[in-house]
Image (tube, coloured by chain):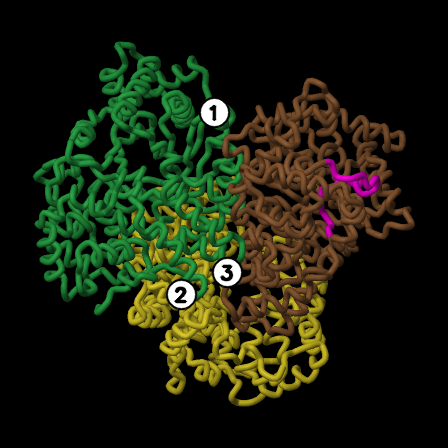
Chain colours: A yellow, B green, C brown
Amino acid sequence: MSQSIAANPDRLLPADPGTRSIARALLERVEDLPIISPHGHVDASVIERNTPFPDPAALLVSPDHYVTRLIHSSGVALDQLRPQAGAQAGDAEAASPDSRTVWREFCKSWPLFEGTASGYWLRNQFDSVFGLQHEISADNADATYDAISAKLQEPGFRPRQLFKDFNIEVLATTDDPLDDLASHKAIAQDPIFHGRVLPTFRPDAYLSPANPAWSANVDRLIAAAGDGVTGYAGYITALENRRRYFVDHGAVSADHGVRTPATLKLDAADAAGLFERARSGQATAQDREDFEAHMMYQMARMSVEDGLVMTIHPGSFRNHHTATFNTYGADTGHDIPFAINYTEAIRPVLQDFGTAKDFHLVLFTMDETVYSRELAPLAGFYPAVYLGAPWWFLDAPDAMLRFRSAVTETAGFSRSSGFIDDTRAFCSIPARHDTSRRIEASFLARLVAEHRVSEDRAHELIVDLVDASPRRVFKL
Amino acid sequence: MSQSIAANPDRLLPADPGTRSIARALLERVEDLPIISPHGHVDASVIERNTPFPDPAALLVSPDHYVTRLIHSSGVALDQLRPQAGAQAGDAEAASPDSRTVWREFCKSWPLFEGTASGYWLRNQFDSVFGLQHEISADNADATYDAISAKLQEPGFRPRQLFKDFNIEVLATTDDPLDDLASHKAIAQDPIFHGRVLPTFRPDAYLSPANPAWSANVDRLIAAAGDGVTGYAGYITALENRRRYFVDHGAVSADHGVRTPATLKLDAADAAGLFERARSGQATAQDREDFEAHMMYQMARMSVEDGLVMTIHPGSFRNHHTATFNTYGADTGHDIPFAINYTEAIRPVLQDFGTAKDFHLVLFTMDETVYSRELAPLAGFYPAVYLGAPWWFLDAPDAMLRFRSAVTETAGFSRSSGFIDDTRAFCSIPARHDTSRRIEASFLARLVAEHRVSEDRAHELIVDLVDASPRRVFKL
Amino acid sequence: MSQSIAANPDRLLPADPGTRSIARALLERVEDLPIISPHGHVDASVIERNTPFPDPAALLVSPDHYVTRLIHSSGVALDQLRPQAGAQAGDAEAASPDSRTVWREFCKSWPLFEGTASGYWLRNQFDSVFGLQHEISADNADATYDAISAKLQEPGFRPRQLFKDFNIEVLATTDDPLDDLASHKAIAQDPIFHGRVLPTFRPDAYLSPANPAWSANVDRLIAAAGDGVTGYAGYITALENRRRYFVDHGAVSADHGVRTPATLKLDAADAAGLFERARSGQATAQDREDFEAHMMYQMARMSVEDGLVMTIHPGSFRNHHTATFNTYGADTGHDIPFAINYTEAIRPVLQDFGTAKDFHLVLFTMDETVYSRELAPLAGFYPAVYLGAPWWFLDAPDAMLRFRSAVTETAGFSRSSGFIDDTRAFCSIPARHDTSRRIEASFLARLVAEHRVSEDRAHELIVDLVDASPRRVFKL
């Protein structure tokens, strides 16, 4: 294309000329603010080691389940797009496609991405990160592969330089509770790198007895941090210790990817009983659910005590297609949302901690129906509750506008978490934050055009949404 | 502010200039029509006694849970905003904050309300009712307190004069079945006051055995109106008698605030059995639910017989935060909606009465998902069913537009209840009706601009929606 | 009216002038493309016999439950609008209203249809099919009845000529598995009629033991096509045989109108056990549900084998008002949607067939909440899954825009089924497809105006959506 639509300064802004002009002015206020990314999945070692990114396909296609899923839906087998599960661990039996072949498949499939969030982010990267002059296509697959490969070898494309060029101020990672956080430590102590890379405590695999690895994980957890105590008491102690370790290494939040938002308060004896039954394989399905719900309550209790912001990401049926999971592992594009409820499920936590001083509980959803029905009313009363930004499938222009429309009239602007990019695709971070800022500007511009918010206040609000909100909510 | 956005004649109208101009013309048709308010919570004695409103905080902040909840969410304790539960009953132990202090807290919190429905109504009142020249703020809290206080002492700010100035024609209150309706009688007999103030029969506390006061309430009910009959038969007789009393005093509707919309037809012997079990404390949770569902069926049956319009407001988890409820009582900002279904729940009533002559059943929801899925299809077939207007958290510009978009294509315009302000905040009534009229104009203007409805028909439709619909649906 | 809004070339296009002009250009690309109708309820014999349509009321009002339901909701008894259930079968006891009286009632009720999808389609037919010069009204009921009646006698208004004039290329009907498809055969063999009229296999009445006629239907099925085998094996064989018969007569899809989207894989012995229990009246409600869910799995398995596209239309509570059903039969306006889930329900089928070669599974819903939450994520991974177009109550301008907004950002444009008119109202087919094309143009025009899709790509996309998608998805 002669000029990419990704380069249009008015991209994503509302079509009505008067509203667009208001939106432009709002956007100007926040375009150059630093990126605060309090939740995501970039690996800290990428920043620590600062090694060049491998190649276009390994950077932009294979690891991104947003991208491979849509190509897969068109009938391309995943083995054309990503390595099998064991490949990264060095399993010689596990197949791994050639990068250039993956890139050709991706270029051929590029038209599938029209209108999608992924398509927008990718086009934006091609334009503003890699400076491609033409829209990618099956015809220019080899040429664009070579062009991007060449860029990736330049010193300016090393992770640390990009971190700086992307104007990232804070980047949170997502980490196993037993991670030693060595990369985080190394980055923090580096005298010449000034970005903040913070760990996040993510204990799912240690809290859910339905996870086949749970009991082994618990063994390792207690051995590592149980202070010599065994059983349920040692388990609780170990979790508290590891959270403290994360706090000491800069963590500001604990993240929970759970099937449902159920929470449950049990007394210690009942909880210990469920724990033992689950450990010995005697627990019923209900026991396992109750124990996990109780542990979510415990996580809230610990957050009240140690100050870690608690974020909950529920409502996804993970690994929906077993055959794909068996061959390619988790996070391969077939986690499918379902209906959730927060009003009853989260109540045990809110009864006890909903007004607790400095407790921050950020609630996410992929079930849009809870926005106006449950989340905005909850966040509009409980000081602890914040509205998690639109997430995953909802992290897209129209979906973000639906979110603002659904929650603002009930909860205003002050109860939002700020934007969450939640990404493992490092180079997409600027495009994602840019999208969010444009949508905030678009929403506010409409309210100004409809004389619902004054233009002066809108200018204050957008700065608050983009910059102050994430700092405030995530205690940065 | 030099000019409040609340004074802008185009406020809330669509930004597109062509559509806005159509909307302006539509709005002109209905701006000066009288206010019909067939459901709300103003106390009739306020109109009867015509005493001045106490002070700005007691009028506009403390009793309004829309307002106190959002300030509370920012971390302000409720004891800074409203009296404890016993205070109004004269309990000397119950704390009550100083009004001026409440007002300062409110002014400081005013930015929280940007973009909310409450914020719009309040700004509109400040502008058009109290004539404030500047946006309220922490800085002018004392000055605005004094200015509004002074206004409230003027004879023009007595309730009856405001009733007239607000152009209210009909105002329905919400009343206990054993209320003697003395205030309503006095108002009706007053030769110099011409507004209609109608009672509404609200029997929740007498129908739900889950209510701890139910059995005592039933005792009082049977004693007062059971015609000497005891047990279930006396209970039914008493309800019929009290409904008749309300009809004789001008009531046009019976309102039901229920947890779910469940209805159930039982024969008299089974119902009497449940009644006795509930009275003696032997009922299970299921028994209690079944009995309440049966009583909703009975209420429909009685409405068919005595002509009271039946309105149902389901789907709220009342008093979600027990600690707040214990200290401050009900209606203090933590009633949280949840998912409901109407299709199966309301069927027993519709099977028997859905085509009954002159039976009007108005169904409300805070779960927006039922608009297009259940309510519009039901109202588009059953002559008894009317679409309740967007209510509570949904009573706001964007939410009202979503409602019209969700229901109109299936049910047209003729099946709407007309706007319901549902408010206990008397001075907000004009702002709320003004909002609704502007949104109806906005929605219709879009259909005209898209050549889906002719401009002439739109002018007829908006008059019907604002004026004829509530008269027709509520039999006024 | 001097000029009907139905004749406005910009009808349904967005109001913003810039966006409208983009939409106009997009619409021009597809306005003259032939109509592909891969799912609907027109009777093949109407085309075969080519007899004139009877009269305006019998053509446009009485058989159309979209139309009679809304008139009924205004208090008109159905016996003023449509024959009782037995009338068409010649039952002398069954009442049937006079056509001219029905038409008068319809004309009087015409204002009810403002803003509805039915109203738009009807106005469009009056304008472009029947050339009425004035909006219909109570005043001109007899005149419009006579005008349309006269048209219906003209040779140009015979079904085959209209089929040609409407530019229909493919029209699929919906047929009983034991139908001999004689009309389809006759049409296919007719040397002078070139339209394709394809049968669709619709086995609901043979798959659901909850249907009172199920066992008798199964008897007939096995007798006709069981190859002499009895019991469950004969039943499966007979279904396979009849599907093959349909394939041989041009069918491209099998359609399933089910209460829920539940699917279940049972082994043959368990399935046979349930079958026998259901046949002997011993099955529990759960047994019946399990058996039907298993048969949906079987239908998927057969589709994988014989290539028929599988379409599922779930989520309607059929015949909600028993008294109306008893007098007027099914499809009389009181089928009411309810909440469904696909994520868990459809999983057994997707586990085994979600990536099966050439298996096409088109999922429909009347519960809009599943669009973004479940359907777009499923269709964005599984090659088998396609997003069914907005259907029934959702087959309307705003609802279609909500659909595109909800699914596109996750699934793009390539996973859509193409428009489905699903109608038994033959003369409404052009209006319905015209509506759909205008809405596709409107949605794409907004994306272009917001620089989210380039104008060139949008021109390709709209041709794909209108023409290539239905051909590809329905294997035409």
Are circles 1 and 3 on residues that touch, CB within 8 Å?
Answer: no
Q: Is C291 located above or below residue C461 in the figure?
A: above
| Residue A125 is covered by the magenta coloring | no
Please, which chain is the residue tagged with disc 1 on?
A: B
Q: Main secondary structure of the magenta part?
A: loop
Are circles 2 and 1 on residues that touch, CB within 8 Å?
Answer: no
Residue B179: x and y in percent read: 21, 26
* Residue at the bottom extreme of this rendering: A155
Which span of residues is magenta-colored? C37-54
| Residue C46 is covered by the magenta coloring | yes
**Would you name the residue on which mark 2 appears?**
A446
Comparing labels 3 and 2, the label whose residue is closer to the camera: 2
> Given the image, on which type of amino acid does mark 2 rest?
Arg
* Residue pictured at 38% horizontal, 48% vertical: B394
Crowd around label 2: few <14 · some 14–19 · many ≥20 (10 Å): many
Distance of label 2 from label 1 (alpha carbons) = 45 Å
| Local secondary structure at mark 3 | helix
Q: Quadrant of the C terminus of chain B?
A: top left
* Residue pictured at 46% horizontal, 55% vertical: A365
State left or right for residue A209 relative to residue B188.
Answer: right
Crowd around label 3: few <14 · some 14–19 · many ≥20 (10 Å): many
* Residue pictured at 59% horizontal, 74% vertical: A60
**Would you name the residue on which mark 3 appears?**
A394
In the picture, the disc for residue C27 is none
**Residue C327 visible in the current orientation:** yes
